[in-house]
Amino acid sequence: MKVAAVILNYNSLNDTLNCVTQLQKQTGVELFVIVVDNQSSNESEVCLLRKICEGKNCHFMSAERNRGYNAGNNLGLRYAVSNGYQYVLIANPDMVFPQVNYVSTLVQAMEKDKNVVVAGSDIIDAAGYHQNPIAFFPEKFRDNFSWIRNLFVKDPLVKLQWNSNPEHTTYCSVLNGCCLLLRSDFLMQIGFFDERIFLFGEERILGKQVEMLGKKMLYEGHCQAMHNHKRSKEGSQITRFGYLKQSELTFIRIYSGYSSWKKWLLLAGVQLKYFLLHLKYRNH
């Protein structure tokens, strides 16, 4: 099976090269790596990355400007789809793959059920927390108000143990976007990732797109990857709040499917939430 893997690089030279090396060790599939640079600030590092990719038989691409996570990934995804790859893996540069059969395990799981269009694995962070799936079941209207409770948490972005039974394979509604395997025909159906989202919240939208097409999202518990995430690269907390707010507003307006009055209530709630968060963290 021929599979493409897309790595979106942004000022992450060492992580990206390590990710490329690990993906090229995968067995059971013929894996072609595509590296997309999303307008990194260090030109010498970009030139070095391009040269090393050529030596490793990877395809290197550069975005003309940084239009965000989804837009950057779409460059690689469109290249993979146009070149006939049936499956495409997206992986953040800071992903680590200890299992050499990681990709083939995900492919085999999707081959068994043609209704599965997105699959992900167990993902642990540097502290050992299991970060997948983000949600097992579709959200309910009341779930949109959990922020009221979370507002009083010291850090609203605190890492959580989302899955207490990580070895159990199951369908789910939202997977962590740091590492996903997607069917190419599904990507074409949804017009690739929504580029109105700059960063954060893309997982929720992807889950809704799967649901709207009557397809399935699969959490495969028999393979595991590590995510050495560095929050320092996301900018200040206020900057992150701005990205999150944009994503939430887009989801409510375009994808939620709620009635007009429910949308109005949620949109007002989002404005209030981020106003209060800005007050809480204005000196951070």
Image: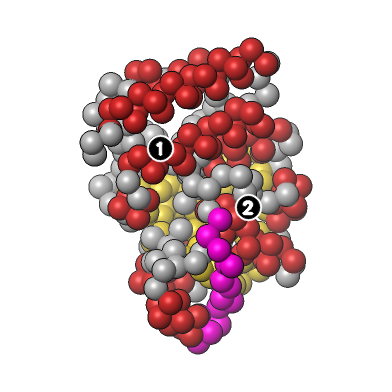
> Label 1, on which residue?
241
Do residues under tags 2 and 1 come within 8 Å of each other at their CB atoms?
no
**Residue pictured at 61% horizontal, 19% vertical:** 263
- Image location of residue 131, percent across then percent down: 39, 42
- Image location of residue 71, percent across then percent down: 60, 55
Look at the image and tell me whether residue 208 can be seen.
Answer: yes
Instruction: Left or right? Give the position of 234 relative to 137.
Output: left
Instruction: Left or right? Give the position of 10 relative to 58.
Output: left
Q: Which quadrant, please, contains the C terminus?
A: top left
Mark 2 packing: few (<14 Cα in 10 Å), some, or many (20+)? many
**48 vs 211, nearest the viewer:** 48
**Residue pictured at 43% horizontal, 47% vertical:** 122
**81 vs 243, nearest the viewer:** 243
Q: Which of the two discs, 2 and 1, sits closer to the camera? A: 1
**Residue 93, picture quadrant:** bottom left
Q: Amino acid at mark 1?
A: Phe
Q: Amino acid at mark 2?
A: Leu
> Label 2, on which residue?
182
- Image location of residue 144, percent across then percent down: 49, 21
CA gap between label 2 and label 1 equals 28 Å
Look at the image and tell me whether residue 108 can be seen.
Answer: no
**150 vs 135, nearest the viewer:** 150
Mark 1 packing: few (<14 Cα in 10 Å), some, or many (20+)? some
**Residue pictured at 35% horizontal, 23% vertical:** 276
Task: Please provide the residue range marked out in magenta.
Answer: 53-67
Q: Is residue 135 above or below residue 186?
A: above
**Residue pictured at 67% horizontal, 38% vertical:** 209
Residue 201 is labelled as none
**Residue 149, picture quadrant:** top left
Q: Is residue 194 above or below residue 164?
A: below
Q: Is residue 255 above or below residue 181?
A: above
